[in-house]
Each structure stands twice: as C-alpha cells, then as structure tokens.
Image: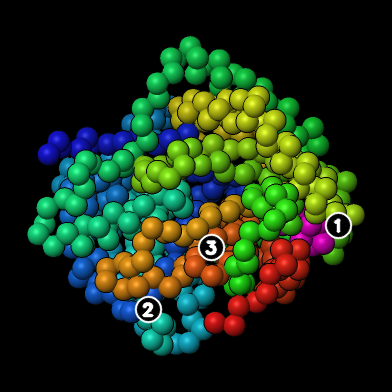
C-alpha cells in the first residue's frame, strides 16, 4: 500500500469558508457542521472506533491539524509527527426531545482545527431512539463528503477480515487540476472582475440589524411528507426551492422593517462531482453560483423561480462558476483576514443576504450503518455571525427536512416556525406524523 503524504492542501472553497468565520465578528467563530443519521438500532462504539482507526491508515488527515508554514503559503491538513489523532467517539443518553439541544451544543462547541482533530462522532440514545451525530469543522469537507466518509467507514466495518473492502482505493482528495497555470490565471482574473461587480447595491442581512455576537448557535428542524416530484418542471429543483425560501425571507424582512428594495444575494453551492460519483471526502468540492433577485414582495414564487433558473443557466453557459472556482484556488495564498476587502459590496460587513443549500437525498445507496438500519437523517450547518441565518433542505426516505439555522439573536423559535410555515405552504407539503 502506498504511504499517504503527510499533508494535503485545502481547496479554494475551504479557505473562503475559514475567512468567512472572521467576517462579522473579526475573530474566529464556530463553523461546525453536523450530520444526524437516525437509526432503528443502537451502534456499538467499539465498531465505530475500529473502523476509524483502520480508515486513518488510508486518510490520516482526518486526525491531522491545520497548518500554514508562512502567512502567504497554502493552508494544509498536516499529520503530526507522532501520527494522526483518532477523532473522538462519544456516547450520550438523552431524555425525549433533547436531540435538538445536543445538536445545538455541537454547533457551539467549536472544533479548533489548528489544535485538535477536525472531526468528532457522538452516538446518542434519545430514550430508545438512536442517532449517529457527525460533527466537523466546515473547511474539512462538504455535506456529501461527510456522507461518503460514513459510507467508507461502514464498508470497512463490514469487511471483517481486516482487508480493505475496495477493489481500488477510494477517492479521498480532489483530483489534481489539469488546466495550465495560464488558463487558470485568466479564469481567475475574469472571476475576480465578476465578483467585484456582482452587487452594485450591497446586500443586507438580518444580522446587520439584530446580531449582537453572543456565540450562540441554534437550529430548528421541520419534517414534512416527501411528495412525488411535481409534474411542473418549474416546481422541481434548486431554483424553485430558493424562490420559496426567498418568499419566506421576504416576509421576515417586512416584519422587521428592513428595506425590500435591496436585492437578495445568495451563494448557491454547485457540486463538482460527476453525477453518481461519491468522492472526494476531504475538501468542499463545490463551485458557487451567486443568485441575485429582488425580494418577492408580490409573492410570485413561480416568476422568481423562472428568473433564478434562467440566471443559473446563463452562469453555467458563460463559465461564471468555473471562473469562480479558479479564483478561489488562487485565494488560497492570501491571508484570511481581509480576504473580502476588495469586494466593494462587502464593505458594510455582509457577504450575502442569507445562506441556502439543498443537500438532496441522504445516503441513497445505504440501508445500514454499523449494523443498524437507517431510518432518516438531515444536515445542519452553523452559519457565520454575518449573515447570521440560513435555510437548508435534505431528504431521507419519505421525509423532507427543512432546517432553519441561525447565529446569536438573529432569529428566534417563532421566526423559524413562521419561515417553515411559508415553505410548507409554497411546497404543498404536509407535516409528517411520525
């Protein structure tokens, strides 16, 4: 077996995520991201620890530390001289209804990637309901990478004779860039020019008016029946869901008395993995499209979805997403603080209006983890102090999950419930009774 290198460089989006942690507060805040997998049985922690130990042989950077040899050098996941640290596996016994509070604690308890392994697992028993809770520092990997990590750990667990279960090594890190330096440089220059002119009117987030730094991170998860796909193509896919979220956010803007003549600016992640492929594990292997729209005070979600769909199609045809990817790659050489100072629309502190993501179907090719049947699950992201709020979609089995996540005092439970109610109505979903 080939010995893995002692370090692996972060991707451009990983570094941008690190920089965003300091955008609002000026100091590093939690960027923890959580994957909750619901299970029909308990998991033996020894099996998880054994699989982790075996996996670190192939992917030691999960037990590494973040390092930067010089202020202008690339950030890297570096394996300590004594070898990787095995990420901790903990067990928790919870009373009914306490899982949400556990996830909130996981969001708040910042993983410091410079001083500890950037990953931890918790096996939670909530009065007989079992959950695997995976928490990681967001620059380590994206949501699909976290699912692939669990997939690989489960495959190792199922290979009882100790031999690797894979015919060929799994894709753990992003494939190398094949374009020439000149080509990437031209793309990056075009991407930088696009970013600078992206928002002639700077976006306004909720945190700009109600986001005193407290370190608080909260979320609420809402569960709905997953209906069959709509026969109307417009009402399927990311643009429709973003339009629905924009309508819900507009209602909140109106209640707060925020200006609705300032366009929304929302970064939307675009998975760079070929359809059907799982790797890599490490790195946020994502391009970004910046969706722009006027807050839909007319309530016309269909019109807005059509505009957002056309806007995304134009961005793909025009190479904007590839240009942004190349630009983020060059940003890896820059200091984290002040990375966004060259963007005129961030001068007031807001990089975007709110966060949004749709992580699609959870582990569609797995029925069990460590011997326990999978019954559901969802992703939860810790949003930065600015913009301070985000809405995230995921699906598992017959359940659609909508997660409202916020920082500090930007939202409260009543706000989260109001947002979820509008999304439910626009999507035509019903609340699950399970």
Mark nearer the N terminus (1 vs 3): 1
Give neighbour class at mark 2: few <14, some 14-19, many 20+ (Cα, 10 Å). some
Q: Residue at x 44, y 51 (%)?
A: 144
Which of the two labelled residues, at mark 2 and mark 3, occupies the earlier sequence position? 2
- Which residue does the image show at 43% across and 58% down from the upper left? 364
Q: Does residue 250 belong to the magenta stretch?
A: yes
Question: Which residue occupies the foreground of this view, 398 or 208?
Answer: 398
Residue 71's place in the image compared with 101, above or below, is above
Crowding at dot 1, Cα within 10 Å, few <14 / some 14-19 / many 20+, comes out as some
User: Residue 103, which numbered label?
Assistant: none
Is there CB contact under 8 Å for labels 1 and 2? no
**Disc 3 marks which residue?**
395
In the image, taking residue 7 as reference, residue 346 lies left or right, namely: right
Please count the marks in the image. 3
Q: Label 2 belongs to which residue?
A: 40
Image location of residue 43, percent across then percent down: 28, 74
Q: Residue at x 51, y 76 (%)?
A: 101
Horizontal side, residue 143 vs residue 427: left or right: left
Q: Where are the magenta residues, as a range?
A: 245-253
Residue indicated by mark 1: 299
């Amino acid at each position: 077996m080939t010995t893995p290198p002692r370090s692996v460089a972060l991707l451009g989006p990983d570094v941008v995520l690190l920089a965003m942690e300091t955008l609002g507060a000026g100091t590093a805040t939690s960027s923890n991201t959580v994957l909750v997998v619901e299970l029909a049985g308990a998991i033996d922690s020894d099996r998880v620890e054994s699989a982790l130990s075996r996996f670190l042989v192939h992917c030691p950077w999960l037990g590494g530390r973040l390092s930067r040899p010089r202020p202008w050098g690339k950030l890297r996941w570096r394996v300590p001289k004594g070898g990787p640290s095995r990420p901790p596996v903990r067990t928790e016994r919870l009373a009914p209804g306490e899982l949400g509070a556990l996830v909130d604690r996981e969001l708040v308890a910042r993983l410091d990637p410079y001083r500890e392994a950037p990953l931890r697992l918790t096996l939670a028993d909530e009065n007989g309901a079992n959950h695997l809770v995976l928490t990681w520092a967001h620059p380590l990997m994206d949501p699909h990478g976290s699912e692939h990590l669990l997939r690989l750990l489960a495959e190792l667990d199922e290979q009882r004779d100790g031999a690797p279960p894979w015919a060929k090594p799994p894709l753990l890190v992003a494939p190398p860039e094949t374009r020439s330096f000149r080509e990437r440089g031209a793309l990056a220059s075009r991407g930088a020019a696009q970013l600078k002119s992206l928002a002639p009117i700077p976006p306004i987030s909720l945190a700009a008016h109600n986001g005193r730094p407290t370190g608080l991170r909260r979320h609420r998860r809402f569960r709905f029946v997953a209906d069959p796909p709509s026969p109307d193509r417009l009402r399927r896919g990311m643009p429709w869901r973003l339009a629905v979220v924009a309508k819900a956010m507009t209602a909140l803007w109106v209640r707060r008395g925020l200006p609705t003549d300032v366009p929304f600016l929302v970064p939307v992640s675009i998975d760079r993995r070929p359809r059907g492929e799982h790797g890599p594990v490490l790195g946020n292997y994502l391009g970004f499209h910046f969706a722009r729209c006027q807050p839909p005070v007319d309530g016309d979600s269909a019109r807005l979805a059509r505009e957002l769909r056309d806007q995304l199609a134009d961005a793909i045809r025009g190479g904007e997403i590839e240009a942004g990817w190349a630009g983020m790659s060059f940003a890896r050489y820059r200091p984290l603080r002040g990375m966004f100072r060259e963007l005129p629309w961030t001068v007031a502190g807001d990089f975007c209006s709110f966060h949004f993501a749709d992580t699609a179907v959870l582990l569609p090719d797995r029925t069990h983890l460590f011997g326990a049947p999978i019954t559901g699950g969802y992703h939860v992201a810790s949003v930065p102090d600015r913009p301070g709020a985000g809405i995230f979609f995921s699906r598992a089995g017959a359940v659609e999950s909508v997660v409202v996540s916020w920082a500090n005092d930007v939202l409260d439970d009543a706000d989260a419930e109001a947002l979820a109610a509008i999304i439910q109505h626009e999507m035509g979903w019903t609340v699950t009774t399970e």
